Structure formats: C-alpha cells, structure tokens
Image (tube, grey):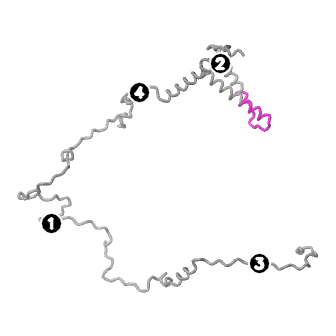
Amino acid sequence: MSAQVYRPRESVYDLLPREEVKIEKPPRYVSNFRPTVVEEEKLPKRPMRTMGPANVQLPSPENYLKKHSKEPKLPERAQSAKDGRIHPLRKPPVPPRTDHPPLGIHTKRDFIKTCAFVTTKPKPISVDTHRGHKEALENSGLVPKYIKKTDFGKVPAYLQHRNAEKQKAQEEYDNFVKEQREKHEVMRQLNEEERQQILEGLKKNWDHLHHEYQGLSVVIDTMSKRAHKDRLETEMTQLEKDIKKIERFKIIYLTDN
C-alpha cells in the first residue's frame, strides 16, 4: 500500500511577493569569569595531578619503620634509688627534724569544715515481695504524705471558681425574674414535681427523636432525606439545651401567657 502524501491546497495569495524576515539572534553569552579561568589554566597544575611534585626529598634508609613504634607509650614512673623498684603511688619523703615550715602564711580555708566527714543517711525503702523487690518508702503509700499538705481537705481552686460562676448565674437569673415579676406580676414558680415532669417529658421526646434518627438510611441521596435528617438534629440539639438549663436551675418561673 503506497503512503499517501499530504499536499496543501494552492492559493493565489502564494504568488504575492513577501518581505524576507530576518531573524536576529541574541548576542553570544560570555562569562565574566572567563579571564580568571584562562589564567588558572595557564598555571602549572596539570603535570603534578597524578604523579605528585617533580622534586621530592627521599627518606633516609636509617629512619625505617620499627616494630611497636606507633603504639602509645605510658609515661615513665619514678624509680627508687635503693632497690631499683618502681613505685607508682609513692608518697613524698618525711621532712627532717631540722626542716622548719614557713611561717607567716595565712589562709581563709576552714580546715575543720573541709576535713569533717558528713554521714549520709540511707533513703528509707519498702520491700513488698519475698524476692526482695524494693521501692522508695515515700512512693509506696505507707507514709502519710498527702495529709500533711497545707491544702489538704480544702476545696480545689477550680471547684471554687465553678461554684462562684454557678452562684453568679443564679443571682443574675433571680434578678431577671424579679424584674419580670415587677413588670408583669403574672409569673409563678414551678414546684419540684412539675420540674421533674417537664424534665421527664423532654427526655422522652429526645429518646423518641433519637430512635427515629437511628432508623435513618445509611445513604442519604435525596433532598427530602437530607432535610429530614437536619430537622431531627436541630430538634435534638434544642432539647439537649433545654434539659441542661432545667437541670442547672432549681428555681424556675413561668408566665401564664
């Protein structure tokens, strides 16, 4: 099968003379470090790259490498003049009777405190197994450690702060109720039975909505399912807020409206 050659269509406009477009090339790049490189190439470095310098002083044959010459050597010890033995921990000789110590030298050093030996008491331990396992007595729980603290038996700071906030909220609520009662004079206080009945009713409503929420389909692929799910979540959130408010405030007032 012969290869088909694509030939463009002829046009009359191809016969019109066209101006020759000259392509101007940018100037050739020349590095600023070219003279430095030329000078470095002229330096006599290449002849000594592989074989080393031309003239090297030869070592003397007398300084040959001897056995154990590169091993570390210990410092020489003092040798006794009498028997020739080596005493590594020999004390200085006793001064003669005619040798008097230098007088008039004073020092601020307290030799009594320096030479006094302070005995350290062993830390008390507790052995809790027959195999000898031991631990510090302070961490074993056998020592009354926490009852000796200054804040033992006192209410912690975070509980005091929480109680103060609760009391402040209750006072603000009481003031608000007092103002409303003075304005309308139709507010009444819920007793404990009515408060418990309202709580039980709200919790039953929440259980009913939660049961319905658990029965939703796994895949929510329609707008109606999405709207139903959002409505259930909104109602459950509102019920949770109402339950928390009623459980928090013991005194609640209602209007007859």
How far is disc 2 from disc 3 in space, using C-alphas?
92 Å
- Mark 2 and 1 residues: CB-CB less than 8 Å, in contact? no
Query: What secondary structure is found at the residue carrying circle 2?
Result: helix
Residue at the (27%, 38%) spot, across then down: 121
Q: Is residue 136 magenta?
A: no
The answer to whether residue 136 is left or right of residue 201 is left
The residue indicated by pointer 1 is 84
The x, y position of residue 133, in whole percent, is 37, 37
Is residue 28 visible in this depiction of the protein?
yes
Residue at the (33%, 71%) spot, across then down: 70
The residue indicated by pointer 2 is 180
- Residue type for callout 2: Gln
Q: Return the residue found at the far bottom.
A: 55
Please tell me which residue lies in front, 160 or 208. 160
Q: Which of marks 3 and 4 is nearer the N terminus?
A: 3
The answer to whether residue 178 is left or right of residue 10 is left
Location of the N terminus (image quadrant): bottom right
Give the magenta part as a residue range. Answer: 210-233
Q: Earlier in the sequence, mark 2 or mark 4?
A: 4
- Residue type for callout 4: Phe
Q: Is residue 166 above or below residue 49?
A: above
The answer to whether residue 164 is left or right of residue 219 is left
Based on the displayed image, in which of its 4 quarters is residue 29 positioned? bottom right
Query: What secondary structure is found at the residue carrying circle 1?
Result: loop
How far is disc 1 from disc 4 in space, using C-alphas?
74 Å
Q: Earlier in the sequence, mark 2 or mark 1?
A: 1
- Residue type for callout 3: Ile
The residue indicated by pointer 3 is 23
The mark closer to the camera, 1 or 3, is 3
Magenta stretch: helix, strand or loop mostly:
helix
Residue at the (90%, 73%) spot, across then down: 8
